[in-house]
Image: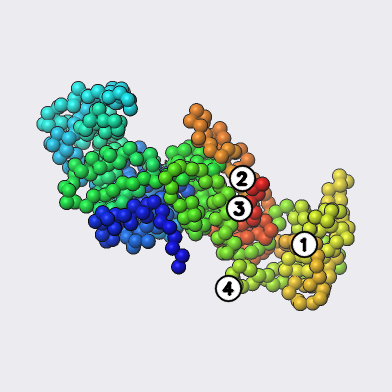
Amino acid sequence: EEKKSLNFIEQIIEEDLANNGYKKEELKFRFPPEPNGYLHIGHASSINLNFGLGLKYNAPVNLRFDDTNPIKEEQEFVDSIKKDVEWLGFKWAKECYASDYFQQLYDWAVALIKNGDAYVDSQTSEEIATQKGTPTKHGTESPYRNRSVEENLSLFEAMKNGETPEGAHVLRAKIDMTSSNMLMRDPIMYRTLHTAHHRTNNDWKIYPMYDWAHGESDFVESISHSFCTLEFLPHRELYNWFVNKVSTPEDFQPKQREFARRNLSHTIVSKRKLAQLVEKGFVESWDDPRMPTISGLRRRGYTPASIRNFAESIGVGKRENIIDMSHLEFCAREDLNKTAQRVMGVLDPVKLVITNYDKEEEWLEAENNPEDETAGTRQIPFSKEIYIEREDFKESANRKFFRLTLGKEVRLKNAYIIKGEDVVKDEDGNILEIHCTYDPLSKSGSGTEESKRKVKGTLHWVSIKHALKADVRLYDRLFTVEAPDADKEKDYLEFVNPNSLTTITGYVEPSLQTSKELDSFQFQRIGYFCVDKTSTKDKLVFNRTVTLKDSWAK
Ligand code: ATP
Ligand code: MG
Ligand code: MG
């Protein structure tokens, strides 16, 4: 077996096991989404990292909802996150919620107050902000910093009981207003918020801040390694300070380490910004197939394996970068090529009449997937009148046109060799019908000499009287620029591509009548298509996952 080199996260773990006294049984990880939106492709990296480590070290991985902000969080988001993680193929050890620890966090906060490590500040948020100082200028201590323990305790309890107005007080950790790390300058631990929470309803009128809740949740769950994105690097000191305050040196301490956020070109990976696209109607929903959400990608036809392979192939890094969308599309093609059934569909039809075909119809055998010998075959109907793609015919063309022209032969996939004979046009010169003759001895797979002769090319087609009409949704990039939110001066919504969706009517072979939501097909010579959730037997709807070739690569 080939030994893959360790990434830097695995190196940290191996070092902890080898030299820092960690036992293998102590390894434990978590994936900690905030339920304030649907998961996106960026989260897939974090999911793949944490659950991947769980598999590698046979260690538990908790799914932890970081639900400390009731204003933005909803049960709908919790449900979608669970669905998406499961769909990606991962299993969590425990389903946890920061809100399950609200009482514990409160008790610890009381202990901190009693120890002189926290105080109630009654200034406005503006006053607190101006006192923060700058990286090069010390902050100023709050006039409330030296309140007595008794006063702090009674005020904090009043805050908790909703007896003080929203915003009147906050609880702050008493650390160091001169610290070079701005986050250590008496950070806020609690704010008052008289908003109902999706799980704790109206039980709480105060809510813990991220820094106070996150490390403590890791500590409660005995997480060994808490991996987060790079912007939390300066939070590490505070993470450790808080964990220190609630634990003893003998306790098993969680360890925060950071990795780089992954960005994808021509889209955005931020729940907050994706929410805007939904709210402002640029897309239909969180699972709109144009969205870089896991649910959008699923509806678009991405498979769990394609997304896992994507995350795995870009790996973990220490520096932020933008991964080109074409890499994600490559991962879709690679997996769908192995798994998607081949079918025929014509998206821009022109009628072709086989003038010497005198049977009513016949059923031909077609291979379901040449990449998968277990996939079998199916029957497809053939008849005198078929559709081919308009672009597959030219009355005359040069040698490089490997399709149908007058006087030349091509093969119809799984059927016969035909020869272009004539065209019927309207007054404006538009082609209404192409007339051809066929060679009855040239049937595919018949083994005859006639079936083996070399022709210009092979075309896909559908029998007109058997074909099913289908709505086919073609997608383009959601944004017209590579990094829509890179320029902080500009509104990323300005770069939304107004032509990201085109719906056309296509014709597909009748075997697709029984297709179901999320079934993926390769429309031969065109691309991969997935059955949309709105598709019915009477009105088939397909989403184009990706074209067969990377049409953006030049
Ligand atoms: P968003 O801005 O989209 O809300 P977030 O980081 O605030 O992102 P969380 O719900 O807190 O979202 O994320 C859960 C986990 O996923 C965190 O550990 C976070 O660092 C990680 N994560 C989020 N976005 C990315 C990304 N683009 N690349 C890698 N990891 C990410
Ligand atoms: Mg977050
Ligand atoms: Mg966020």
- Mark 2 beta carbon near ligand 1 (under 8 Å): no
Disc 2 is placed on an element classified as: loop
Q: Name which residue type carries label 3.
A: Val
Name the N-terminal-most of marks 4 and 2.
4
Residue 396 placement (x, y as % from top left): 86, 53
Disc 1 target residue: 457
Q: Name which residue type carries label 2.
A: Asp
Please indicate, yes or no, whether residue 52 appears anywhere in the rendered image.
yes
Name the N-terminal-most of marks 4 and 3.
4
Are the two marked residues, 2 and 1, in contact with CB atoms closer than 8 angstroms? no
Disc 4 target residue: 374
- Mark 1 beta carbon near ligand 1 (under 8 Å): no
Viewer-nearest of discs 2 and 1: 1
Disc 3 target residue: 546
Spatial separation of the CA atoms under disc 4 and disc 2: 34 Å
Please indicate, yes or no, whether residue 187 appears anywhere in the rendered image.
no
Q: Name which residue type carries label 1.
A: Gly
Q: Name which residue type carries label 4.
A: Thr
Residue under the image location 78 percent in, 58 percent down: 402
Spatial separation of the CA atoms under disc 4 and disc 3: 24 Å
Q: Residues within 10 Å of mark 1 (few under 14, many from 20)?
A: some
Color theme of the render: rainbow
- Residue 35 against residue 365 in the figure, above or below: above
Residue in the foreground of this view, choosing between 66 and 15: 15
Spatial separation of the CA atoms under disc 1 and disc 4: 27 Å
Disc 4 is placed on an element classified as: loop
Residue under the image location 37 percent in, 61 percent down: 56
Are the two marked residues, 4 and 2, in contact with CB atoms closer than 8 angstroms? no
Disc 3 is placed on an element classified as: strand
Disc 1 is placed on an element classified as: loop
Residue in the foreground of this view, choosing between 265 and 342: 265
Spatial separation of the CA atoms under disc 2 and disc 1: 28 Å
